[in-house]
Image (spheres, rainbow, N blue to C red):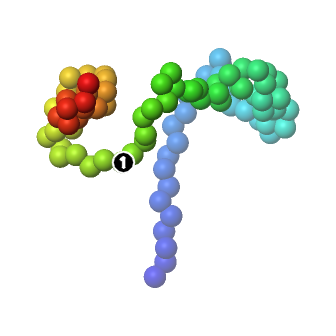
Amino acid sequence: MAKHKKTRKIISTADNENPEWSKEDFARARAASELIPEVVAAYRRGRGPQKRPTKKLISLRLDRDVLEHFRARGPGWQVRINSTLRKAVGLP
């Protein structure tokens, strides 16, 4: 039985502002870290230290409806879950 390759027709339009790169363009290309290392380093810094590094990253399974309840109220849902748990166990 012969295997058939699926082929897709590629539709492209000319883009004068962003022309397709040639082999020469690729040969001249350099990594951004070589050209502007301070900018690349700034993006790789990450989040940085927490103001109060007292929280611990865990994995927790919640019922779907509970999760939807907290997420439906917008950003900060993880903080609201933490606050609700603190109240439930009697912590300030």
Q: Please provide percent x and percent y for residue 61.
A: 26, 49
Q: Report the residue at 61% width, 22% height from top.
A: 15
As drawn, is 72 to the left or to the right of 56? left
As drawn, is 71 to the left or to the right of 16? left
Please determine whether, in this image, residue 40 is positioned above or below residue 66.
above
- The C terminus lies in quadrant: top left
As drawn, is 5 to the left or to the right of 17? left
Q: Please provide percent x and percent y for residue 5.
A: 50, 64
Q: Report the residue at 28% width, 32% height from top.
A: 82
Q: Please provide percent x and percent y for residue 85.
A: 23, 35
Q: Residues within 10 Å of mark 1 (few under 14, many from 20)?
A: few
Q: Nearer the viewer, residue 25 or 45?
A: 45
As drawn, is 18 to the left or to the right of 3? right
Q: Which residue is mark 1?
A: 59
Q: Nearer the viewer, residue 21 or 44?
A: 44
Residue 36 appears in the figure: yes
Q: Report the residue at 57% width, 27% height from top.
A: 49
Residue 77 appears in the figure: no
Looking at the rendered structure, the kind of residue marked 1 is: Ser
Which secondary structure lies at badge 1? loop
Which quarter of the figure has residue 32? top right
Q: Report the residue at 83% width, 29% height from top.
A: 34
**What residue occupies the far bottom of the structure in this picture?**
1
Which quarter of the figure has residue 74? top left
Count of number-bearing discs: 1
Q: Nearer the viewer, residue 10 or 25?
A: 25
Q: Please provide percent x and percent y for residue 70.
A: 21, 30
